[in-house]
Amino acid sequence: MSTQSFTVATTFGVNARPELEVQGFADATHPQIPIRQPYVFRPELLRDVLAYLHEARGDGLFLTGPSGAGKTSLVTQIAARLNWPVQAVTCHGRLELSALIGQFVLVNGSTQFVHGPLSVAVREGHILILNEIDLMDPAELAGLNDIIEGQPLVIAENGGEVIRPHPRFRLFVTGNSAGAGDRSGLYQGVQRQNLAFMDRFRVIEVRYPEPEVEKAVIQAAAPKLPELIIDKMLLVAAEVRRLFQGSQEGEPELTVTLSTRTLVRWASLSLTFKGAPNVFAYALSQALTARAEPEQREAIHRLCADIFGDYWTTTP
């Protein structure tokens, strides 16, 4: 695939020097290019990801942070604007490295080897995103060490096939921990990762956006929602997150939180069900609180009623 230069300021809608460019691909028709969606880029995170895309230097990039903070969407929306194909996999405790490399499957009565997302990304110069990497067995992930450093991928199952990494191949992983395990007890199944594996990654922390950024995200997703209502939703989110995270002295009071993803869902559903009785409570229930414990659900809705005031029982 032929490359193309993109101007950072115009491509990502951020303040940057007019002459600052980044390399992507010219072909915008590849089926693995993520669908472009409205997105508000945070300059510091954009800077770090673009720096890695420009030059990996034998590293992977680990994005850590709370659920729904925008770790995966940050990468996919950058890739969408650079026409960069993406292979994305959600990890789990039973995922084996062989599934990422490829396997033999039955095709028209005969078996043939089908390359997996890792093999395709390495060969074609795609971005590989391994989501929830800290759920995967550390012993399986150790098999990625040489690939990250630029060594050839050798597929013994396919007759010793050797795939030399494309210079544009990039590996991103996301996780709710930074490889050290989950001390909060909120993310079940998270495993402590091997130090040698983690040593091969740059690590950036993706927190929830600042209120003004998050407000712009909601306005892009639900443009007909009144600004006053969005402001009140943001106040609710801030308080719910505070209770979810707890303090140094005490345990968290909530086991669910209003991530940016959930906040956008709440805003969008409030418009979808516009005109329904108690629309904000109804939309919040579907977006979040229906999966909370009854006492926590009641506490969150009571908090909303205090912040929204009379608007809690009106339509947008």
Image (cartoon, grey):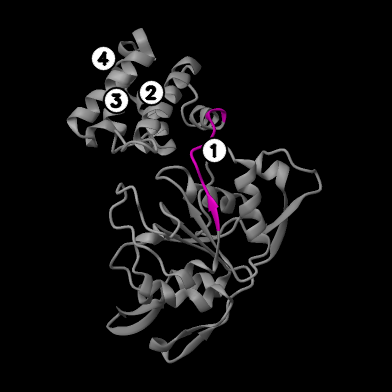
Disc number for residue 82 = none
Residue sitting at x 35%, y 7%: 310
Q: Residues within 10 Å of mark 3 (few under 14, many from 20)?
A: many
Report the amino acid beneath label 3.
Answer: Ile
Rendering coords of residue 231 (x, y %) = 48, 20
As measured in the structure, the alpha-carbon distance from the residue carrying label 3 to the one carrying label 2 is 20 Å
Report the amino acid beneath label 4.
Answer: Pro
Residues at circles 3 and 4 in contact by the CB criterion of under 8 Å: no
Tag 1 secondary structure: loop
Q: Which residue is mark 2?
A: 271
Q: Residue furthest right?
A: 19
Q: Toward which corner of the image does residue 59 lie, by quadrant?
A: bottom right
Residue range corresponding to the magenta coloring? 203-212
Tag 2 secondary structure: helix
Q: Quadrant of the C terminus?
A: top left
Q: Which residue is mark 4?
A: 277
Residues at circles 1 and 3 in contact by the CB criterion of under 8 Å: no
Query: Left or right of 316: which side holds 59?
Result: right
As measured in the structure, the alpha-carbon distance from the residue carrying label 3 to the one carrying label 4 is 18 Å
Q: Residues within 10 Å of mark 2 (few under 14, many from 20)?
A: some
Q: Which residue is mark 1?
A: 38
Q: Which residue is mark 3?
A: 300
In this view, the mark in front (3 or 2): 3
As measured in the structure, the alpha-carbon distance from the residue carrying label 4 to the one carrying label 1 is 30 Å
